[in-house]
Amino acid sequence: MKIYAAPLQGLTEHIWRNIHAELFGGIDAYYTPFIRLEKGSLRNKDIREIAPENNIGNHCIPQILAGNGEELERLVNEISQKGYDRIDINMGCPFPPIAKKGKGAGILQHPDKVAELCSIIKGHDEIKFSIKMRCGMESFDEWKRLADTINETPLEEVIMHPRIGTQQYKGDINMEAFEEFRKACAHPVVYNGDIRSLSDCNSLQERIPELYGIMIGRGLLANPELANEIRNNKEADTENTLRKIHTMHDLILEAYCNTLHGETQILMKIKPYWEYLMPDMDRKARKKIMKSTSLDKYRAAVNEAL
């Protein structure tokens, strides 16, 4: 079974990907936070994200966000020039400012726009494409209007998060809708959504033994060893995992100290990891980390917690 690392904006950037791959591994591919055009060209931060020299040691798959064929064509050409032959198209981002522009999950309400993107895919035999999507934006049946178009498009796989856009990341997963989609889809289907433990994965595999793959995001940020636990069907040694988490954290912090300017900027970048990392840790310890006002206080709080 394939195991992919999901993209999370601001968190699973190349620094995290490289360090996770080196210390933990267990991941078949790391998907980048979505890359998009801004004022007609790639953002500098996106260029850095997909630079081959910044992705040594991890199997990186660029994910792109486009609302029409022209945008998609431009993005595909830019990324392929960097040497990539595999690209994922985001049709699942539920963030309202994105969805309202008919991008991400918002495009699922527009079969004509989905068909336009798929026509661009058909024109690039040199690239292997996948789609990451939801069941719909406002209804779990919206995918049905897109099924024929998706099935007729050459895709390596479809990654399905069985929520709708209006739910964002809350509310119940609709496994019945996922199963209906999986059976109707002509491509391998990867499951994405709320896999936060080995038990969650085992329950999913018991329900769908023939599952092609899974994508884990928040669960992997919470427990960087999760992919290996799933592969080995065994929970990792807690003490050893803590040591590796501490090492990973220190390496990420060091990288931020070398690339960002000023303590405030560094702390604003590193603290969001603690919204996910080790969810069962002592609340007072987490609060002390999050309220740290200097790097010295932050490091001391982290060392005390780990």
Image (cartoon, rainbow, N blue to C red):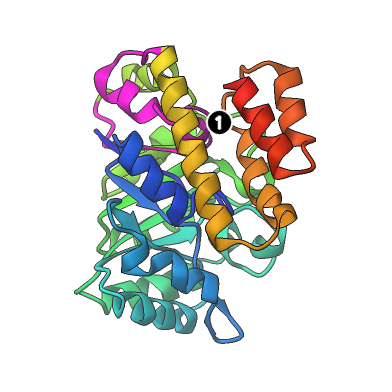
Which quarter of the rendering shows the C terminus? top right
Instruction: Specify whether 96 is left or right of 105.
Output: right
Image height of 197 relative to 271, above or below: above
Residue 193 screen position, x and y as percent = 50, 35
In terms of secondary structure, where does tag 1 sit? loop
Rendered location of residue 245, percent (x, y): 47, 29
Magenta span of residues: 210-237
Which quadrant would residue 237 be assigned to in this image? top left
Q: Tell me if I can see residue 103 in this picture.
A: yes
Q: Nearer the viewer, residue 281 or 181?
A: 281
Rendered-image quadrant of the N terminus = top left
Q: Is residue 291 left or right of residue 143?
A: right
| Residue at the image position 39 percent from the left and 33 percent from the top | 179
Number of dots carrying numbers: 1
Residue 237 left/right relative to 221? left
Q: Which residue is mark 1?
A: 173
Q: Amino acid at mark 1?
A: Ile
Residue 144 percent coordinates (x, y) = 46, 51
The picture quadrant where one finds residue 272 is top right
Query: Where is 268 relative to 167, above or below?
Result: below
Could you tell me if residue 92 is visible in this image?
no
Picture coordinates of residue 260, whole percent (x, y) = 61, 61
Please give left or right for residue 190 compared with residue 172 in the image: left
Residue shown at the point (53%, 29%) measured from the top left: 222
Q: Is residue 202 magenta?
A: no
Instruction: Please tell me which residue lies in front, 30 or 1.
Output: 30
Query: Does the magenta portion include 229?
Result: yes
- The residue furthest left is 126
Q: Residue at x 63, y 18 (%)?
A: 281
Residue drawn where x is 29% and y is 16% of the image: 233
